[in-house]
Image (tube, coloured by chain):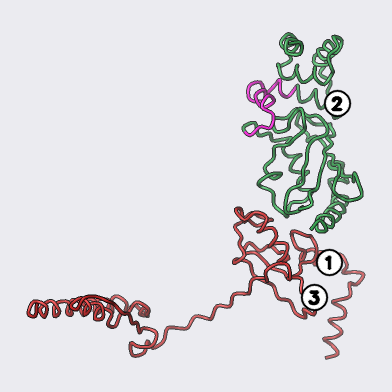
Chain colours: A green, B red
Amino acid sequence: MANIAAKRIKREFKEVMKSEEVADGTLKLELVNNSWTELKGQIAGPSETPYEGGKFILEIKVPETYPFNPPKIRFLTRIWHPNVSSVTGAICLDILKDQWAAALTLRTVLLSIQALLSAAEPNDPQDAVVAKQYRENIELFHLTAQHWTNVYAGGPNVILDFVQKVQMLTDMGVDENQARVALSTFDWELERATEQLFS
Amino acid sequence: MAETSEAQASASAPGGDGSEDDKRDERMLECNICLDTARDAVVSMCGHLFCWPCLHQWLETRPSRQVCPVCKAAISRDKVIPLYGRGNTKQEDPRNKVPPRPAGQRSEPESAGGFPGFGFGEGFHMSFGIGAFPFGVFTSTFNFGDPRPSPAPRGTAQYDEEQFLSKIFLWVAILFVLWLIFA
């Protein structure tokens, strides 16, 4: 059965390469090994979202039972989104779980993940902290997501205030990523973030 | 004869001009699961094409959620239709591992009603009952001319039913009188 998986991934890979999304740069796909079991995808942050201008890299693991079971996909690029874990990059998306259908392909799944970036589902969160901020302070959420996109995904919008706050904490010897997570979690209140980091 | 063989030859050989169209035609006949040309093709009620082995495995993978892999409409092994093309010359049988593809369903064309006959034939119905003497008579008598298996054609159902009911009441009355006399 692994034979079907490899054969199908090969076909899909070719199809993605010929697709217009690859031509216009919205999607990218590359092989990690020669056994067609692991790939790397890349999606462009959709326009008119805080992710605009960012390039997000995804880890794609193809199970032996593919396409009868979904591929395992997570973000390798850190991202601030209610349905993606800010720590592990795990994605909460129904088609990657119980709503998987065998006719879905790597191309359609990557496009679905891209669509998830423009339409978050805060009521079915993967990251409760992010979802809470999304519900309670959407403007701050947008800024935070923009900042993360700028730092991790090469987005164009520098949020100077946030950069400075992270810098303050790293000057105190805190790991940069940890500092950013703490600040983002506590709505960029330096005192509460520091308290949490040093408690 | 010469004409047909020529037409076949030109159809099977992808020509320079029509290669784009040919490719599209080929993709139309691809299985939605393995993305290869469908073998042992079946089509779902929602119109999606699959290899039977592929679809079978999909249905086996999630027995509790049997949906079409393309449109998520309800799907089941009894509700797919096999496609039989012409000239299936393959000697090997790829269905060794999976149960054979469901057979096509041939329903007979509906007959136009016609003369119902003499009350026997399709309408004839018999049953047996066991009971103590006086009630035993009931069981065998009540089934006399039972019309259940023969729905009366052309709007006479009501009439038949009334006739039948009045017959029953008559029999009940007679039996009741007999029972009163003999018991």
Q: Secondary structure at mark 3?
A: loop
Please give the label number shown on residue B21: 1
The residues bearing labels 1 and 3 have C-alpha atoms spaced at a distance of 30 Å
Q: Is residue B94 magenta?
A: no
Name the side, left or right, on which B75 lies relative to B18: left
The residues bearing labels 1 and 2 have C-alpha atoms spaced at a distance of 44 Å
Extent of the magenta region: A124-143
Give the mark count. 3
| Pointer 2 residue | A156
Image x and y of residue A112, in percent:
74, 43
Is B93 situated above or below A181?
below
Mark 3 vs mark 2: in front: 3
Q: Secondary structure at mark 1?
A: helix
Name the side, left or right, on which B42 lies relative to B64: right
Image x and y of residue A70, in percent:
74, 48
Q: What is the three-letter code of the residue carrying label 1?
A: Asp
Q: Is residue A129 magenta?
A: yes
Quarter of the image containing the C terminus of chain A?
top right
Q: Which chain does the residue under circle 3 lie in?
A: B
| Pointer 3 residue | B92
Q: Which chain does the residue under circle 2 lie in?
A: A
Mark 1 vs mark 3: in front: 3
Q: Which chain does the residue under circle 1 lie in?
A: B
